[in-house]
Amino acid sequence: MTFPPRNPADRHCARGLAAALLLALLVLSLPAAAGAAGASKKVTYRGYSVRVPRSWPVYNLAAHPATCVRFNRHAVYLGRPGANESCPGRAIGRTEAILVEPAGTSVPAGMNGADVTRRVSRTGVLALATWNRSPRLVQRALGFKSVRSMAAAAPRAPASSSTASLSTAQVRASSARSAAVTAATSTSTPGEIYTGKGFDVCSTPSESHMSSWGSSPYRAIGVYIGGTNRACSQTNLTSSWVTAESEAAWHVIPIYVGLQAPNNSCGCKGITPSSATSQGTAAAKDAVTQALAIGIGPGNPLYFDMEGYNRTSTNTNAVLAFLKAWTNQLHADGFLSGIYSSGGSGIADLVAQWGTGYPEPDELWFADWNGSATTSDSYVPTGEWTGHRRLHQYSGGVNKTYGGVTMNIDQDYLDAATAAEGSSASAASGPPTSTSPPTISGNAYVTQILHEHHGGWFGSPSSYTYKWYRCNGSAASCTAIAGATGQTYKVQSADVGKMIEVAETAGNALGTGSAAISPLTAQVEPVPTSSYYLFTAYGNVYNALGAAFYGSAVNSGVSTISAMAPTRDGKGYWLADRGGRVFHYGDAGSSRGVKPSHPIIGMAGAPGGGFYLLSAYGNLYNLNGAPFYGSPHASRKHVSTITGMAVTVDGRGYWVVDSAGQIFSYGDATSLPAVRSSYAVRGIAAAPGGGAWVWTSHGNIYNVGGAPFYGSPYHEGYRNSSFTGLTTTRDRAGYWMVESGGSVLPFGNAEPLPAIRPKHPIVGLAG
């Protein structure tokens, strides 16, 4: 299988750690026989004792003020965290850990959001704890009767609101999309574009350390404002720190480390796939709460940290749903949405959604440790996230020294919006503004339905209007199509030879924004004439209904041809054998083929170019530029009876089916119910509207997901088991089935044809 490359930045995840809530310890006393913790020891601070597993280290912060207080390792910290902790550039996740410190007038900075505290007033001690897999250890230490009662007793942070604001003195107007690079001597402003070097650190540096680094080449700093997987304490991160550094012309990158992919390598608490949307919304609301608490108001960007993950369908679908909700909620609250992830996982998944109407983030921060201080990168196509919307983490875990102060940092290069103290009055409210154009799906030929998909918008649109245009060769010469003002448009005869575009306008309670224009479709063609090919295991190719013949593999000495796929333009095709060898004809690009783990049993062309190969064990290989959305094998679904696949009509997903009728969905392919058949399922074909046809060798055809039914050989009295292929007409208003002996049966608008007399049995049909 062709997997996306793993990114070096993925190793940021600390092994075996997960998120936890932060709770207070009212009376820290743990029985010696506490669960599976084994032998325990008593640790005393200012008259209070806590019993913890003997293996836990104890750090005296008064004696060692540079100790990094982080909650992704088992430890007990005694005393107040130092102002200049010596922390790694990044640490992710939470586990069982305890901090006991002198109680002040307020909860220590950074202990907010998912963090919960309780003050022990009698002796002036403030005790905090986190947990992951052993909540009972903390529960017993807290003296609660149960974990549930402990969690229920935890105070909750106030919910954020779209009307949340800072004091008038804190609000400063800014040009949120200014292209100019901020001078090092000026004061940074909310939402301001900064172009240049920056760094991010696990624990926010003190103001004195920031001053020492004034001589560095960096003018932007990433700080962790909250999230259930944030590991380091944030003693220095206060509103006064944000104000001071904004006035010192530092550009802040606020980072929120919330739930990670469901199956992640860092052991962090993950997204629940069924709750991804609500969890993404909750994360954004909490991030806004944390930002407001330190003086960062609307108009500023907030960046979600989504660490690296394997791009399985479970992970990808959950992450995209979560991040979609994150972006939508931040826009509703008047903030810009930023997302950080590794080039090979989160960034790849977001790039795959570009142009689909998915609400992309305003700012994209990609991790690719290639040492190149630039925002150009192979993971992000040139035309995407342009206009000062990119950040690049180009190296990590490096020690740098300036002004006599050494810090371990990750290095970044920015050309994007950053945060500062206050709010941007111009960006905090107003009509929606476009962040990415709408797109069109559907086939550009007469009688077909084109569908408009929303572009990205900042400003929480509540309504949309549409206008379709007929263009003569370029977007500069377009005429509005009378009456075409819906989200769909049926292609007319008058459109032949033209290209189609649509303008989308979004509105909200504050007004209507400027129209965003989609890319042009391909040139509109007349009602298509369908054609198809039949092929044998020996490489014979038979063309019908005017399909051009470009060659065959009949003289190549093979006898295991198992699949065929025409090119998108119909001017070529590929053949593949069970061993992964690929033959190309016409304008089909040459391919190196694959060396599969299991024999190849299926093949499908990708509408955007390239093709897929499929094995019975669910291995799926994407070749010649075809996008990869997942596979049964990548999802660790242990099957060995996969029989076919079908690419969705818009080309942004696909289905894979097994002999029992179970259908696996990837990309934008809708979830379809399993087919219960008396005979083994042999294949699947995509229908318009998100449905599909599933067929058996006995001639049964099952329409699922709303696909229309045009008939089947079984319904017409055929009772044999020699049907070897099914393909649809070009407009998908009909289909053919072929028998191994060469008989082709038409249904719907498929044209009838006489049977052929093949030299060898027909093993498939492609159109």
Image: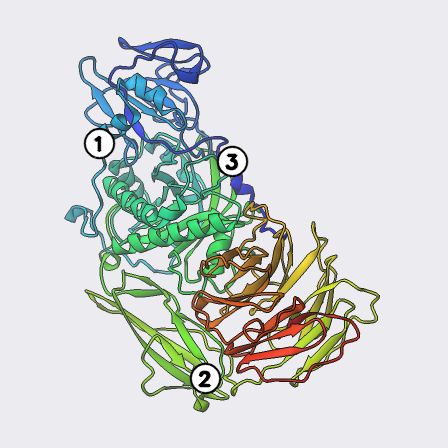
N-terminal of the two: label 2 or label 3? 3
Q: Where residue 463 appears, x then y in whole percent?
A: 26, 68
What separation in Å lies between label 2 and label 1 (alpha carbons)? 60 Å
Secondary structure type for disc 2: loop
Q: Where residue 141 appears, x then y in whole percent?
A: 31, 17
Q: Which residue is mark 1?
A: 155
Q: Say which of marks 2 and 3 sits in front.
A: 2
Q: Which residue is mark 3?
A: 397
Q: Which residue corresponds to the image point at 32% horizontal and 76% vertical from the top-left?
A: 466
What separation in Å lies between label 1 and label 3 (alpha carbons)? 36 Å
The disc at residue 447 is 2
Three-letter amino acid code at the position of disc 2: Thr
Is residue 435 rendered to the left or right of residue 12?
A: left
Three-letter amino acid code at the position of disc 1: Pro
Q: Residues within 10 Å of mark 3 (few under 14, many from 20)?
A: some
Q: Residues within 10 Å of mark 1 (few under 14, many from 20)?
A: few
N-terminal of the two: label 1 or label 3? 1
